[in-house]
Image (cartoon, rainbow, N blue to C red):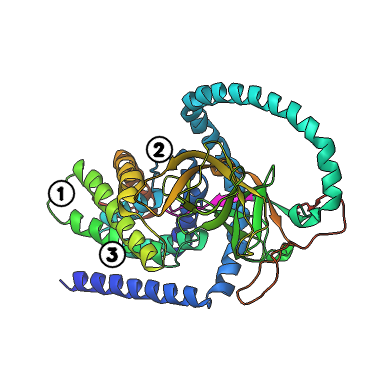
């Protein structure tokens, strides 16, 4: 009886401590302690990530066999389409180079400073889509910085920064929302993460034709992200006449489960609420993107 | 509770859960190794030590996760409480106890976790979460639970040779 009571007290005390930790974390008071613990954990996580990477590949190979067959057929068709498109684009290239001189192209396509980082962990919760990378405040990372991968593909934003590691909120996290623009129709919407790992673009005007396979790019609206980073491709449209807007399902442009190395854009300055300036990234004088390798 | 053993062991389990478990996700669900180990320990040890394990294990998960800090601790404490109740109740059977505990614990842990996510503003869709995460995870945990229970019993005998009657 006495033992039962003491166990109940233990449970209640630990639960109360957990609630206190929850509140302290929300207030930011735990950050120094978290930084110290993460500094210890991140090398172990990195080593474990290397060891267990092979396990994922093994399961991934079995899981993806059917998917690969379908994808192969799709890619063959896309290849044909792209060859046709290349021929058309070559004709436009000359015209484009002339127009580029007229436009202030740096705003559209700036040269960024990048910090490379390896993915050393993923969120253990199936409801959250965060990755841990092995670069932090030591490398100049700050919360809100955009994180990209090959082909100017946006994968998320830096959410929390420790001394030597940082947590990146992926675009398909449930609480992630990014303003996007569909490339062909130029309409804008809000891409939000879904439980199944896809993205849903909401608030697209009902009177516009949303095209399957259209590419969604960051719109730059809100000033939190650079413009024209690739987000995903439209794979389905949900349009109902009685609703005020339509939505489109996106396949993310990157496979978030297979990310190994990412680039953090370190010279983009998000517009803070209240600032009334155009959301432009800070270009560097270099002609090519500068990549700072992670030590 | 031997903290020199418990803390590194649970932190290593949390790191395993953050590195290997997400890569072997089946039908949206993944194996909650830490949850199973903590619940098994509570049922084997049967003296409330599982609550300490739940606290340390949850702390490790929360440090790695980007979710609300403390959510995993509370989820694991709830699951451990259920494991404790079940071990002294109707299902005290060597075969069925781990299976029932795994399913009930998965629902308790995920229920508390989702509730806290909701409170902290994450737009959780309960139907999707149950269908796409909790049910597949419960099945996976149920399948793995007899093995984990056996392994934890063997570990218990190694750490505490005098006890362990599960």
Estimate how packed mark 2 is, as few (under 14), some (14 to 19) or many (20 or more) residues with alpha carbons within 10 Å.
some
Count the labels in the image: 3
Asked whether A122 falls inside the magenta stretch, the response is yes
**In which chain is the residue bearing label 3?**
B
Looking at the image, tell me whether mark 1 or mark 3 is earlier in sequence order: 3
Horizontally, residue B84 falls left or right of residue A19, namely left
Estimate how packed mark 1 is, as few (under 14), some (14 to 19) or many (20 or more) residues with alpha carbons within 10 Å.
some
Look at the numbered disc 1 and give the secondary structure of its residue: loop
User: Is label 1 or label 3 in front?
Assistant: 1
Q: Is A7 above or below relative to B41? A: below
Do callouts 2 and 1 mark residues in contact (Cβ within 8 Å)? no
Which residue carries the number 1 mark?
B91
Q: Which residues are magenta?
A: A119-129
Give a yes or no on whether discs 3 and 2 share a subunit. Answer: yes
Which residue carries the number 2 mark?
B26
Looking at the image, tell me whether mark 2 or mark 1 is earlier in sequence order: 2
């Amino acid at each position: 009886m006495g033992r039962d009571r003491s166990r109940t007290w233990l449970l209640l005390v630990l639960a109360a401590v957990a609630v206190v930790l929850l509140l302290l974390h929300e207030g930011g008071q735990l950050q120094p302690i978290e930084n110290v613990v993460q500094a210890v954990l991140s090398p172990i996580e990195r080593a474990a990530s290397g060891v267990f990477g092979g396990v994922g590949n093994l399961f991934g190979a079995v899981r993806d066999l059917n998917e690969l067959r379908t994808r192969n057929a799709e890619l063959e068709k896309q290849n044909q389409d792209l060859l046709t498109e290349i021929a058309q684009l070559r004709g436009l290239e000359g015209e484009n180079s002339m127009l580029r001189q007229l436009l202030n192209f740096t705003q559209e396509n700036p040269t960024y400073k990048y910090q490379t980082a390896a993915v050393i962990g993923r969120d253990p919760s199936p409801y959250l889509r965060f990755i841990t990378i092995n670069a932090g405040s030591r490398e100049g990372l700050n919360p809100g910085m955009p994180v990209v991968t090959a082909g100017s593909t946006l994968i998320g934003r830096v959410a929390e920064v420790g001394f030597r590691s940082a947590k990146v909120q992926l675009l398909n996290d449930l609480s992630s929302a990014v303003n996007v623009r569909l490339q062909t129709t130029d309409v804008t919407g809000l891409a939000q993460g879904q439980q199944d790992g896809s993205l849903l673009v909401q608030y697209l005007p009902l009177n516009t034709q949303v095209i399957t396979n259209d590419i969604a790019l960051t719109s730059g609206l809100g000033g939190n992200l650079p413009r024209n980073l690739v987000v995903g491709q439209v794979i389905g449209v949900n349009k109902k006449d009685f609703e005020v807007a339509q939505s489109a399902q996106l396949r993310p442009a990157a496979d978030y489960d297979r990310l190994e190395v990412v680039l953090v854009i370190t010279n983009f300055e998000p517009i803070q609420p209240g600032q009334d300036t155009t959301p432009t990234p800070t270009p560097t004088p270099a002609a090519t993107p500068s990549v700072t390798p992670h030590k | 509770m031997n903290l020199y053993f418990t803390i590194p062991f649970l932190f290593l389990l949390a790191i395993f859960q953050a590195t290997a478990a997400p890569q072997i996700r089946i039908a949206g669900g993944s194996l909650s190794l830490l949850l199973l180990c903590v619940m098994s320990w509570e049922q084997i040890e049967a003296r409330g030590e599982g609550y300490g394990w739940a606290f340390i294990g949850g702390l490790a998960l929360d440090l790695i996760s980007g979710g609300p800090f403390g959510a995993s601790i509370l989820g694991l404490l709830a699951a451990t409480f259920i494991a404790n109740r079940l071990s002294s109740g109707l299902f005290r059977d060597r075969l069925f106890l781990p299976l029932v505990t795994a399913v009930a614990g998965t629902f308790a842990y995920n229920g508390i976790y989702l509730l806290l996510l909701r409170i902290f503003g994450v737009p959780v869709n309960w139907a999707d979460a149950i269908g796409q995460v909790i049910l597949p995870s419960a099945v996976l945990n149920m399948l793995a639970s007899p093995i984990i229970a056996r392994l934890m019993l063997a570990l218990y005998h190694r750490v505490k040779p005098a006890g362990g009657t599960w």
